[in-house]
Image (cartoon, helix red, strand yellow):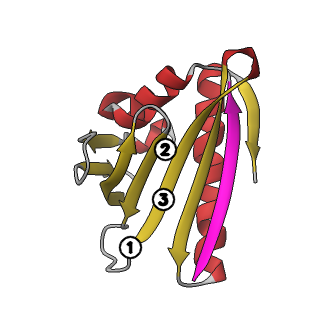
Amino acid sequence: MFEMTEGALVAASVDDVWRDLTDASRLADWIWPPRFETKAVVEPVELGAWRIRSGVAGLAVNGRVLVIDPPSRLRLEWRWEGEEHTTDAELTLEEAADASTRVTVRHSGFLSAEERESHIEGWSNCLQRLVDRYGGVASFG
């Protein structure tokens, strides 16, 4: 199995970034590009739904909350629609200097290096949109 870690320093409070991960309308605003017209469903409880969908792009993630520890840790079962294989995505938030938040994504369970590389690119792009939302430092691996 393969895994990846990406991170970013976001110029927003931990509470604001937490809401960006756990409020469906806020998540839909940044997780994918605006042209994707993303819709999200978030049930911020253990075993709750965490889903994102773009009819325009033909993409969907059907996730489930495995662990939720507000406002610092969210662990998700991650499954792309149409696929049987699931992976594990853990997002952690830590207070950083200047009222910023360090966001770290650890995603594991990939079946190949190519799948991992695709997710590194995807998470890097997602985190950059989160940075752009508030300002901060571009994503880092």
Q: Are marks 3 and 2 in contact (CB under 8 Å)?
A: no
Q: Nearer the viewer, mark 3 or mark 2?
A: 3
Above/below status of 72 relative to 105: above
Q: Could you tell me how many numbered marks the image carries?
A: 3
16, 125: nearer the viewer: 16
Under mark 3, the amino acid is Ala
Q: Which mark is residue 86?
A: 1
- Of tags 1 and 2, the one toward the viewer is 1
In the image, residue 2 lies in the stretch drawn in magenta: yes
Mark 1 neighbour density, 10 Å: few (under 14) some (14–19) many (20 or more): some
Locate residue 68 relative to residue 7 in the image: left or right: left
What residue lies at 36% left-to-right and 51% top-to-bottom? 67
Quadrant in which the C terminus is drawn: bottom right
Can you name the residue that lies furthest to the top here?
A: 98
| Direction from residue 141 to residue 78 in the image, left or right | left
Provide the residue span drawn in magenta: 1-10
Q: Which mark is residue 89?
A: 3
The percent position of residue 117, horizontal first and vertical second, equals 66, 70
Which residue position holds label 2?
32
